[in-house]
Each structure stands twice: as structure tokens, then as C-alpha cells.
Amino acid sequence: MTINSYSDKFLQPLLIGLTFFLPLSVFFTNLIALLILLIWIASGKFRLKIKEIYFSKIAKASIYLFCVYLVGLIWSSDLFWGLEMTRKMLEFLILLPILITITRHQNISQYINAFLYGTIILLILSYGVWFEILPTFKYATIENPTPLMSHISHTPIIAFASYLVGYKLLFFEDINKRRLLFICLLIFFISLTSNVFITAGRAGQLAYYLLFGLLIFQRFGITLKGLLLIIFSLTLVFFISYNYSETYKKRINEISFDLSEMDNDRFNTSIGQRITFIHNSLILIKENPFIGVGTGDFPTAYELINKKYTPSVEITTNPHNMYLMVTTQFGILGLLIFLNLFYVAYKISIRQNTFIRNHGIALLLFFLFINLFESYLLGHFTTFLFVLFSSIFFKEYETN
């Protein structure tokens, strides 16, 4: 253990508090992260801490990723935007490596439960707005009740929480002895599922389907029974959601409308814009294949491409795809370093015990998938989600 037991008495409650506030507050997650950093520094023993970070494959992969953003400033003409992009990646330089030295194997259930307790509060606020018990506030509307963050982050976080609760249900032991707890978890899972589909985050909704299918495979294996259960369950979820959630029905129908509008050469729809972003980003990559345009030059470079090829479509500072974002900035070399983070995490996962391995694989697939639809490692809530749970599931525990 690199942290002395006295400091750990402060750090573990703070870490549990960090997981609790993760789905609730930018201010408190940043404040607690700062307190963790200060106590980590004040507790000394830097030689042991640096040694643990050095031998942590996920910590090094995280630092390498940050270094790509730092080095990419060299060939960036827009230094201001480049520094802003680099700032967004500071969690990979500082927070993840530090948390690797703090997370404890025996406290994993406490970390997960704290996150789920925070999610309960988020659900209460969301349903409060949806049922018109609470007034609309911040990001929340009655049609899209995401009170504390935009639906881009809200729905994926709820979807990941549904996996954590679903895992507890499918691997529940002694139902007869703890029937009340099982019923509470079931109600919690249904509430999470419902919330995914009354909000407007399509990436989170698709991720829910992915994680639900993964849950079944993890419980029943790759069997005909498992496959049939997945098909039946997800079909039922889709049928109920489409027929009883106006928000979900509207979002599904928008896909059909957007695709039909593309046939008329209209690309200023949600789907049309995203296809344009992909198209123009691929042109950028073709022109700068190896090292990209630099950390800060995507907005400027994209504007020029957009003006040339698709002047009628709005410009963007983000192609809404993390892989395209990284590749346009840093080229193929940058993309390989980015993917290395996930490869290292996978290699660690398969050597863990069943519980940690299953959760680690779920976290990996979840982020590999949602990053197709948005740059989720540049947003506060989802970045903290990845960094925090990576330090929990991808730490190479000595007890394993």
C-alpha cells in the first residue's frame, strides 16, 4: 500500500464521496478531486506512489494519451483552443494515475453503491420534473427531464447505472433470505430503464441495449437460451418504450425523417449533420493522415473544409465522434495511442476475477460504443465516469 493508513482514512471517504457526486455535480466532483490531490501530496511517500503508477499499465496508457495532446500543441496554430482541449484531458494526466494508488479491492462494492445512491437522487429529480412535481430547471424539460446535465451525458450515465444494478439482480444470491433487497433492486432497475427511454439521449439508449445484451451473455453464456432471452427482452423494452414514451417515439421517428430528407439533399437535420461531420472529418484525415492538424486546429481546419464541400451545413468544433476527433487532431499515430488505452484496459480485465472482469469489459464496451456518437472523453461527467471506474476496474490488484 503506497498511502499510509492515516491518510487512507481520509482518502477512502473522499473517494466514495467522489463516486456519489459523480452523477450529480460538477462543483462537488471537482472540489473532492482537489481535496484528494492535496491529501495525496501531503501524505508524502512519493517514491512508492510513483513506483505504483510506473508499474500500472492503465496509468501509463492514460499519461501517454495526455502527452499526445501536449505534443500536438507544437503544430497547432490556434494555441488558445489547443490549451483548452489539453485542459479537458487533465484527468488522464493527474486524476486517473492518482486514483490508481488509492482505490482498494475491498472497497469496490462501496464505490459502486455510492455511485448508485447518487444516481437515485438524479432519478428522483428527473421523475420529479417528468411528473410535474418539480418545476423545470437547468437542463430539464417535461419532455426531456435531464435536470443536472444535458441528455448527451444524462442518458449514458443512467444506462451504465442500469448495467450495475442489472448485474446485482442477475447474480443475486439468497433471494429467499433477502427478498426485500431483491425487490428494491428490481424497482431500481425498472426505474433506470424507464428513465433511459423518457430522455432524449439516443447514444445512451443504444448503449442500454448493448449493456443489457452483455448482461445476459455474462449470466447465461453464449447460448441459444441467452440469445432468445436477449431478443425477447429487448424487443419488449423497445415496444413498451416506443408506445408509452413520446420522447423516445419522437426520437425514433426523427431518424426516419432525417434519412428521408437526405434523399432530398437536405443535410441540416441531426442525422444529416452528423454524416456531414464524418464526411468532412475523413477529408481532413486524408489530408493530414499521420500527425493530424494539431491539438487546437480542428475548428479552423474543419471550417475551411466545410466551406469548400458543404457550405450550406453548419460548422462544428467537434465531429461528435471521439475516434474522428482524435484522428483529425493527431493522425493515425494519435488514434493508435488512444486505442491503446482500451487495449491495455482489456488485457488487464481478462486477468481479473469474474466480478471485476465482467464490470471492466462492460465499461470498455460502453465507452468504445458511445464514443462513436460523441466525444465522450471530453465532457466532464462522462470523463469522470471513465476515469473513476477505470481506476477501480483496471487496477492490477495484488489480491487477484
Image: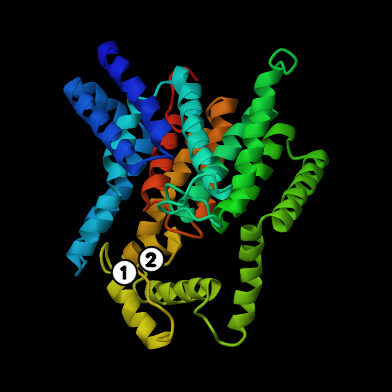
| Position of 221 relative to 287 (above/below) | above
Q: Name which residue lies at 76% across and 52% down.
A: 235
Tell me which label, 2 or 1, sits earlier in the chain: 1
Q: Label 2 to label 1, Cα distance in Å?
A: 8 Å
Query: Residue 394 sits in which quadrant?
Result: top left
Q: Is residue 55 left or right of residue 23?
A: left
Compared to residue 264, the image places residue 75 above or below, namely above
Q: Please tell me whether mark 2 or mark 1 is closer to you in this view.
A: 2
Taking the image as drawn, is residue 158 in sight? yes
At 39% across and 63% down in the image, what residue appears? 325
SS type, badge 2: loop
Whole-percent x and y of residue 363? Answer: 52, 41
* Three-letter amino acid code at the position of disc 2: Asn
Mark 1 is on which residue type?
Answer: Phe
Looking at the image, is 326 positioned above or below residue 48?
A: below
The disc placed on residue 72 is: none
Q: Position of residue 306 (x, y in %)?
A: 38, 81
User: Would you name the residue on which mark 1 appears?
Assistant: 298
For the N terminus, the image quarter is top left
Is the residue under label 1 in contact with that under label 2 (CB below 8 Å)? yes
Residue linked to disc 2? 318
